[in-house]
Image (cartoon, grey):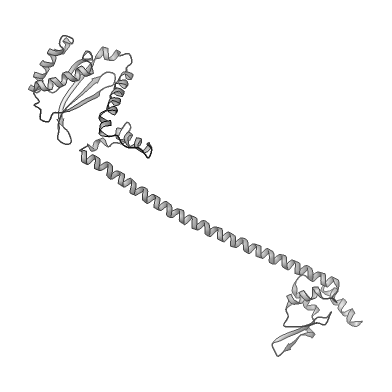
Amino acid sequence: MAEKARIEALVQQVGEITRPSNVFSFYSDSTYFKVGGQQLTAKCIFCKMLFTGAGATRFVDHTSRCALAPPTVANSCNKLIASRGSKRKAKEQATALVQQEAELQAEDHRQFQKTLKQQGIRAGLKCAQAHAADHAIANFFYANGLSFASATTGQGSLYHQMVAAIQQAPSSYMPPTRKKLAGPLLDESYNLMWANQRTREKDGYLAMKFGATYVSDGWESCDHLPLINSAFITAANGGMYWRSVDTSGKTKDSKYCAALMISDIYSFGCTDVVLVITDTCSTMRRCWEIVQNVFCFSHPWLK
């Protein structure tokens, strides 16, 4: 009876078991002794079961299943075991989440490095392609003796318009052939030029009032070809380049130059031309007389 009363008093003293070390009270110090100077042995005060080398966790597990342990003690141990399992599960879940997050970050890093590498390759490829395009355009200028001044990029630049149109063309686009340039494209450009000319002055009032001035002069091209160039200056648009004639092998006397001028004036419209401007060399002076003799009846003011 005294043992039973002592155990009941001990149970009341311990109360709720909130940590594994609380169960040591049910394995009294007097039952601990060394075996061979190494292990400790303890005995359950309820069922007198002997444990060798036991720890708090093993004591809790035994006490929760001990048939002679008071229900309050067993229930407390079961609650402690359940909470221990919940904590372990929560810890495992937290560890799993940390590991998963680390794996996701590692994958993001790999993808980022891969993207950087691909961007570097694409940037290098684009740079090489742009450099090759520069060389192709430059070689075209060099081989055909084109003036570098034509490679302008300002507003209204035909060079800029050409490059922009090629960039917007489909990948299957093929540049025009010599036949196409000298045929339908030339006709379209010619018709468009006259359409623009008429658009600038639809009623023709300025052309009728002031007429047009024909300008002609000669100089060498970039590849040293002797050219005679012509243009018409009007009040409607300020000026319009007409043509350049290669005079290689020709004798540029007054008759030859006059023939070119007369052809240009007829092509433009002889009734619209009121003035001819050239240089004042002796050849041009004789050329003036020829042109005046052709147009003097319809344009007496040319005299």
Is residue 293 shown above or below 182? Answer: above
Q: Residue extending furthest right?
A: 1
Q: Quadrant of residue 39?
A: bottom right
Figure quadrant of the N terminus: bottom right
Is residue 289 shown above or below 131? Answer: above
Q: Is residue 15 visible?
A: no
Q: Relative to the observer, which residue lies in front, 293 or 173?
A: 173
Q: Relative to the observer, which residue lies in front, 36 or 268?
A: 268
Q: Residue extending furthest front?
A: 179
Q: Relative to the observer, which residue lies in front, 172 or 196?
A: 172
Is residue 113 shown above or below 195? Answer: below
Figure quadrant of the C terminus: top left
- Residue 51: x percent and y percent? 76, 82
Q: Residue extending furthest left?
A: 282
Count of residue discs: 0
Residue depicted at x 25% and y 23%: 240
Q: Is residue 159 visible?
A: yes
Q: Relative to the observer, which residue lies in front, 78 or 22?
A: 78
Residue depicted at x 56% and y 58%: 104
Drawn side of residue 74 relative to residue 260, left or right = right
- Residue 170: x percent and y percent? 38, 38
Q: Quadrant of residue 40?
A: bottom right
Drawn side of residue 217 relative to residue 239, left or right = left
- Residue 89: x percent and y percent? 69, 65
Drawn side of residue 281 relative to residue 152, left or right = left
Q: Quadrant of residue 59?
A: bottom right
